[in-house]
Image: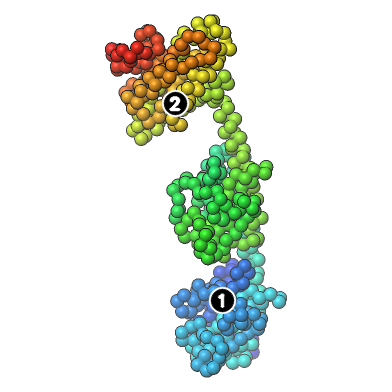
Amino acid sequence: MQKIAILYDASQAVLSTFDLDEVLQRILVIARDYFHLQNVAILLLDKETKQLCTRSQIGGDPGFDSVRVDIGTGLIGTAAQKKRPLYVPDFTKETPYLPWGKKTRSELAIPLMVRDEMVGVLDCQSENPDHFDSETVDLLTLFSTQASMALQNAKLYSLERRRASQLEAINTVARETTVVLDVKELLSKACRKIREAFDVSHVSMLVKEDEDLKLQAHHGNLTLRIPEGGKVPAGASLWGRALRESKTLIENQAEADPDCVGIYHESTSRMCIPLVSFGQTLGVLVLDSTRPGSFLASDIQSLESVADICATAIQNAHYVERVKHLAYLDGLTGIFNRRYFELRIQEELERSRRFNTGMAVIMVDIDQFKRLNDEFGHLLGDEVLRQVSSIFSQQLRKIDVVCRYGGEEFAILLSQTSQQHALAVAEKLRRLVDSWQFPGVSRPVTISAGVATCPDHGNTREDLVRAADAGLYAAKQAGRNCVREVSTVTTCGTGTPVRRF
């Protein structure tokens, strides 16, 4: 009667909480204390690998917490396969099984069953032979039934909480997409929220860029294999397969696949979800974990919902960027306009101050353009503007900016440049235009240019533009087809040095 009372109290204890870790710990403590066991462990079934994995233990040998047992292998695996308790009274006597503990003399493995489904095994070990009599085995078997119910309730409760957290993450990401148009900021926030909701080690957003995938945003505690903001081949690894097959893929034993290259050193399992919007694949959402078998098929639907939201947000942000970009383009020449010049000059000045690198402004004017229009007509005049713009764009670096400042005047921003280099660039452009054969124009077309550099001519937009304008005015005064900067020596089209201005 006393043992029945103990069993009742034990059952009430394990059924009084829904926290899975607490349930596991209570089962182990009760089994150890009530039945006087040295070692006791719970192994839960991994449905994907069909293995029993140690989930919690008390008193086991070092390394037992990482044990994985195949169904049908050993005492524990055989008990799970046969779905009934198996008992070895004394391992020193003849038995087909081996003990897990070095000091274990007797061991009892009891399947944890819910209905007819095996969810795990309660493994009880003692250093004493014949520790478990038939009554103790029956009591532990009855207790394991209550423990199975508690585990199932805790798993269901944990699943509901997980689903609620996932729904919250989906709603949060959806709300953010309506107020955040910057792609990097949006994806960074999404990575943080996804990591919290899905309990993974790292979340990454790989966005297509040419033939590669760029690490646009990420959040977590793993060590990168690639540089921050680096690129990986779009056809490589698990993300490459996910892109080719246009479906979510899971790799729960990454270390078992020698061809599976990841972004992070410590990752042992990962999930890749394609980012697709209106039939266009934009990239991949990648989740990494340090735990093998971390990703469940039941998580795919929620994560695909998040991925769809992110893909649509990327598409919207790109659309907004294109609209903004069009607002900064000159309709006639296709190069940037004055509005863009005013935006970028402030950025270049800030970069120059922060990194102590020079920058330059070149103001350029097509000489006697009104006369050219009057002589050859406005259609040919427009074509001259387009061709001059093309010459400038082709000769400058990608980091430099050429803008139509107004009418026949252009403004050029040279990033990370010196005074000598800026003058050389301006002179090169002047020579090219001077020697260019403009179709339909029977006489040479020339330009005049004024150069100003930071910090030589100032550190503000007003200082630089004023100095470049002054240089341009000086070039006009010197006879046109000339490059000038205030307070320096330069050359005119004749190659004759011009004295300091």
Q: Residues within 10 Å of mark 1 (few under 14, many from 20)?
A: many
Is residue 232 visible from the viewing direction of this image?
A: yes
Please give left or right for residue 322 compared with residue 461 in the image: right
Residue located at (48% from left, 79% from top): 60
Q: Name the residue under label 2.
A: 395
Q: Quadrant of residue 299?
A: bottom right
Q: In this view, does 325 lie to the left or right of 421?
A: right
Mark 2 crowdedness (10 Å alpha carbons): few <14, some 14-19, many ≥20:
few
Marks 1 and 2: which is nearer the front? 2
| CA separation in Å, label 1 and label 2 | 67 Å
Judge by depth and name the residue closer to the eye, 123 or 382. Answer: 382
Q: Which quadrant, please, contains the N terminus?
A: bottom right
* Residue 207 position within the rendered picture, expressed as x and y whole percent measured from the top left: 55, 45
- Residue at image mark 1: 69
- Quadrant of the image occupied by residue 395: top left
Residue furthest left in the image: 499
The residue lying at 55 percent from left, 7 percent from top is: 376
> Residue at 61% across / 57% down in the picture?
249
Q: Which residue is drawn at 57% across and 53% down?
A: 239
